[in-house]
Amino acid sequence: MSLEFFSATDVGRARNNNEDSVALDENVGLAVLADGMGGYNAGEVASQMLTSFIRAELGRWLKESSAEATHVDLRRAMDICVDNANRAIFNAANTNPRYAGMGTTLVLGVFREDGLLLGHVGDSRGYRLRGGQLIQITRDHSLLQEQLDAGLLTPEEAAYSSNKNLVTRAVGVEDTVMLELHQHEVQPGDVYLFCSDGLSDMLEDEAMRQLLLAHPTLPEAAQALIDAANDMGGRDNIALVLVRVEGRLKPEGRTWWPFGRR
């Protein structure tokens, strides 16, 4: 099997600057997405610091160590990398008044022979399209999600809540941050979507599913998603990463692919 990657960002219809950032390193199966927050241009600084740091530091570690690294090694490397990035952003926010209070969400995926290790912080999301069905494979770190979990709101009420954008966890706002990590099996034909809330707040999951199914190439699907979010108002910046798993299972049923192939 092989992996195909595509990423895109769009400023949307209501903002003048883009605080979303994405970074890919296809050779090591790495995809990073961040949605910044903060004062004047500070969110843009935080998200770009995070994606650049992870692509450089974790990308280098993967190039040097991934062949021998265990699942436990990779989890530890991801935790350490995000912790170091968090401290860099936190320190910048506390030493430069222009950046005070800045932070960012994160979706971080590493695709390996044994599946996808997916980490996230905040309310940017990961989805998987398989067999025509789209499911969310991350759980928002947000006040709204906590209210849903506690039964204080129904999903219908949540759609109109004023608390949609209040995150309970973000990179750079405190001196430590907890990266939530989960491993996922991958199968040929899977399409993985990482996105900021500029996409998921504008489009229902069903709309995203139909657009992914209707557009056979990743660039076409990405543009269709962005256009649809903007058509619904485009109230925020939009960022997305699409990853398609191509090929078929080997006879013994093992999921495997060479990194870097398109």
Image (spheres, rainbow, N blue to C red):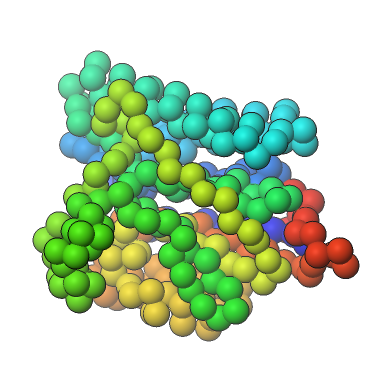
Residue drawn at x 29%, y 41% is 169
Count of numbered circles on the image: 0
Q: Is residue 212 above or below residue 103?
A: below
**Residue at the top extreme of this rendering:** 95
In the rendered view, does 218 fall on the left or right side of 112? left
Is residue 141 shown to the viewer in this render? yes
In the rendered view, does 255 fall on the left or right side of 84? right
For this rendering, which residue is in front, 134 or 73? 73
Q: Is residue 226 above or below residue 63?
A: below
Locate residue 59, reporting x and y percent: 62, 34
In the rendered view, does 152 fall on the left or right side of 260? left
Residue drawn at x 24%, y 16% is 95
**Residue at the front extreme of this rendering:** 150
Locate residue 127, reporting x and y percent: 47, 64
Q: Quadrant of the N terminus?
A: bottom right
Locate residue 74, reporting x and y percent: 62, 35
Residue drawn at x 60%, y 79% is 131
Q: Which image quarter: residue 192?
A: bottom right
Residue drawn at x 22%, y 63% is 148
**Residue at the left extreme of this rendering:** 162
For this rendering, which residue is in front, 169 or 94? 169
Q: Is residue 69 above or below residue 109?
A: above
Is residue 48 shown to the viewer in this render? no
Locate residue 123, reporting x and y percent: 32, 52
Q: Quadrant of the C terminus?
A: bottom right
